Amino acid sequence: MGLVDGLGAWLALRFAAGAASAWVLVAVSAWALRALAPLGRPLLSGTAYAGVGAGIALAGVLCLAMMRLHPSSDAAWIALGALALVIAAPVWMAVRGEHAQSAGRLEASWRPGSSVLIACYAAFGLGYIIPATYLPAMARDLLDDPALFGWAWPVFGAAAAASTLAVAPLLSRFGNRGLWAGAHFVMAAGVVSPLLVPGLAGILIAAACVGGTFMVATMTGLQEARERGGASLIAAMTAAFATGQILGPLAVMLVALAGGSWRAALIGSAAILAAAAIVLLRKGEGPWFSTRRSRFAKFSA
């Protein structure tokens, strides 16, 4: 991005970056979750997924620092790309000898209900991308100082990094689906918070709620996929998420062309997230769900 100009080249590069991001997410999830499962330490999977939020927070803080130095946007792109290579180097050294047992087979059989997981993960992508894309723009409209509205991304990333570590110990109690559904509900509340709390406070609440749940939904969703269909289901759900990310901005554009406002787009996003959460809760697994089903059965009897 920092070495070429022109919209066509930028679109091609962003497409390549998106494809690489999906590839990395599928490969790392398949490799890391399989490697960590025998250890019986759910906090370790939270640590792996916390890396995404840590990277977002680091990039956001570095961009704030570069604002003080007033470099060109090209220089900022190149600096961040170089840093990504430096961070990736030790990772490459650690995993390059493990290719023979790496990302796992693309299992052909999926357990029943996998299509529901794919649909819910697509809903997650659509519901997440609207606030993730437009919250910084909304903050910029409220504040003229980039050093102030620029904090939206560091807050977003820090919340994402902390969230996976915080909820990992809860997996044994609520299960993947329970935590995934809970993340959807909190994210939905964050999406509508700018409509309920005016000004920058509402946007920061949204950044914390969305940032603090999107990696929880990713972690639990992909762990559920690994258990039910392996790497192939992880790949299918990642593709569904990407489809939702494409449809989200298109939906906002259609709302705008129809004369709608931010309010309609945010309410629609929150409604989709909540609907997917309800679907997930219908077949939630874990001791918490088992206890409540037993109580409901006794009550019904």
Image (spheres, rainbow, N blue to C red):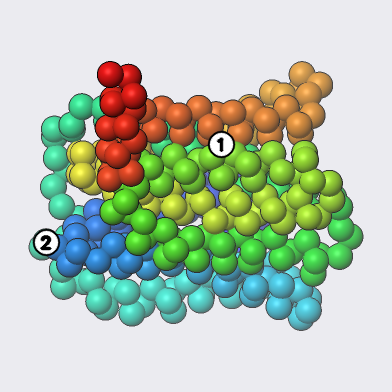
108 horizontally vs 193: left or right: left
> In front: 152, or 250?
152
Which of the 4 image quarters holds residue 102?
bottom left
Q: Residues within 10 Å of mark 2 (few under 14, many from 20)?
A: few
On residue 44, the disc is: none
For this orientation, the residue located farthest to the right is 144
> In front: 204, or 32?
204
Query: Could one spot residue 22 in this view of the protein?
Result: no
- 3D distance between C-alphas at marks 2 and 1: 35 Å
Which of the 4 image quarters holds residue 165?
bottom left
- Residue 131 in the image: state x and y as whole percent: 64, 44
On residue 127, the disc is: 1
Question: Quarter of the image containing the N terminus?
Answer: bottom right
Tell me what residue is drawn at x 18 percent, y 32 percent: 110
- Residue 230 in the image: state x and y as whole percent: 20, 44
Where disc 1 sits, the SS reads helix
> Mark 2 — residue?
101
Say above or below: 184 vs 294. Answer: below
Question: Quarter of the image containing the C terminus?
Answer: top left
Query: Could one spot residue 79 in this view of the protein?
Result: yes
- Residue 193 in the image: state x and y as whole percent: 71, 43
Q: Amino acid at mark 2?
A: Gln
296 horizontally vs 5: left or right: left
Answer with mark 2 or mark 1, whichever residue precedes in sequence: 2
146 horizontally vs 100: left or right: right
Q: Residues within 10 Å of mark 1 (few under 14, many from 20)?
A: many
